[in-house]
């Protein structure tokens, strides 16, 4: 089994997601379409898509993001699992016809998310605590796509997670990050404006142990959905 991961900046890689893929023998290939010379892989050759975050906006009109949205829509239509994180969730929402726009406030650092009643029966989020402290770094948000199931919200952002169909998920928050990743993000030139706006430095280790446990549960379960989708039905 193989998945294709759309990456938009080197520092926003799979992180803890890669651990769950490797544990299950699932291969991964990055598509770095932001690089002018990067080839566009045939996404239909893969069993699923993962779409990572990035500092750009869905609304920037970047040609490579339009290519990704087309690939997302085609993968969903074909029944292949899709997972989006932050910008990736916004790209999925946009591909499904929802509006993406500037949030009322940036949400950067450790903040609580609260799960909806629908999350209690969800294949990924069942058994999660009603409220979890997770990592965020975003200034935009999205409307819930038509037909999607709303799974989580926060004090600043109404739509933090959703499911579309059986195995397409959008997560506005970051479960994939490790403390070294957070520290790296804070040091990136592209993020310096956001960092200057913070009231205090980010403690990269604040809730890292719990975040790692959540990532193992949620991304591990998504990998099982991926495996189930790739398994032919019995004759």
Image: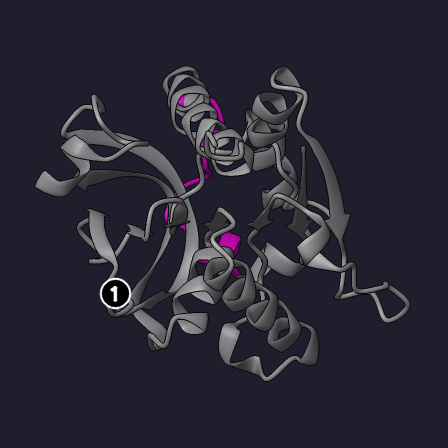
201 w.r.t. 43: above or below: above
Q: Residue furthest front?
A: 235
Q: Is residue 169 magenta?
A: no
Q: Which residues are magenta?
A: 194-207
Residue 137 image position (x, y, % from top left) = 45, 50
Residue displayed at 56% across by 31% down: 17
Residue appearing at x 44%, y 41% in the figure: 174
Judged from the image, the secondary structure of the residue bearing numbered disc 1 is loop
Q: Residue furthest left?
A: 117
Q: Residue at x 46, y 29 (%)?
A: 234
Q: Visible in this render: residue 189?
A: no
| Residue ID at (62%, 72%) | 65
**Residue placed farthest to the right in the image?**
37
Nearest the viewer among 139 and 85 is 85
Q: Residue 212 placed where, x, y %?
A: 45, 20
How is this picture coloured? one colour
Residue 209 shows in this picture? yes
Quadrant (top left/top right/bottom left/bottom right) for the N terminus? top right
Q: Is residue 230 left or right of residue 114?
A: right
How many marks can you see? Answer: 1
Q: Residues within 10 Å of mark 1 (few under 14, many from 20)?
A: many
- The relative height of residue 72 versus residue 70 in the rendered view (above or below) is above
In the image: residue 167, left or right of residue 29: left
Front-most of 179 and 4? Answer: 4
Q: Position of residue 175 (x, y in %)?
A: 44, 34
Of residues 124 and 11, which is closer to you in this image?
124
Towards the viewer: 171 or 73: 73
**Which residue corresponds to mark 1?**
144
């Amino acid at each position: 089994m193989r998945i294709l991961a759309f990456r938009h900046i080197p520092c926003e890689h799979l992180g803890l997601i890669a651990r769950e893929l490797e544990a299950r023998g699932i291969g991964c290939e990055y598509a770095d379409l932001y690089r002018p010379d990067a080839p566009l892989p045939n996404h239909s050759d893969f069993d699923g898509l993962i779409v990572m975050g990035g500092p750009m906006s869905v609304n920037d009109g970047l040609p490579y993001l339009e290519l990704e949205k087309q690939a997302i829509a085609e993968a969903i239509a074909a029944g292949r699992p899709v997972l989006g994180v932050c910008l990736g969730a916004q790209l999925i929402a946009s591909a499904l016809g929802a509006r993406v726009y500037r949030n009322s406030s940036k949400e950067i650092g450790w903040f609580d998310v609260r799960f909806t009643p629908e999350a209690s029966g969800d294949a990924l989020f069942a058994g999660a605590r009603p409220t979890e402290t997770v990592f965020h770094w975003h200034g935009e948000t999205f409307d819930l796509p038509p037909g999607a199931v709303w799974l989580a919200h926060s004090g600043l952002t109404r739509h933090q997670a959703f499911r579309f169909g059986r195995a397409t998920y959008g997560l506005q928050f970051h479960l994939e990050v490790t403390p070294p990743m957070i520290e790296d993000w804070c040091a990136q030139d592209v993020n310096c404006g956001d960092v200057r706006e913070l009231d205090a430095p980010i403690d990269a280790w604040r809730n890292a142990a719990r975040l790692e446990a959540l990532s193992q549960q949620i991304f591990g379960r998504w990998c099982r959905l991926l495996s189930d989708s790739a398994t032919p039905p019995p004759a």
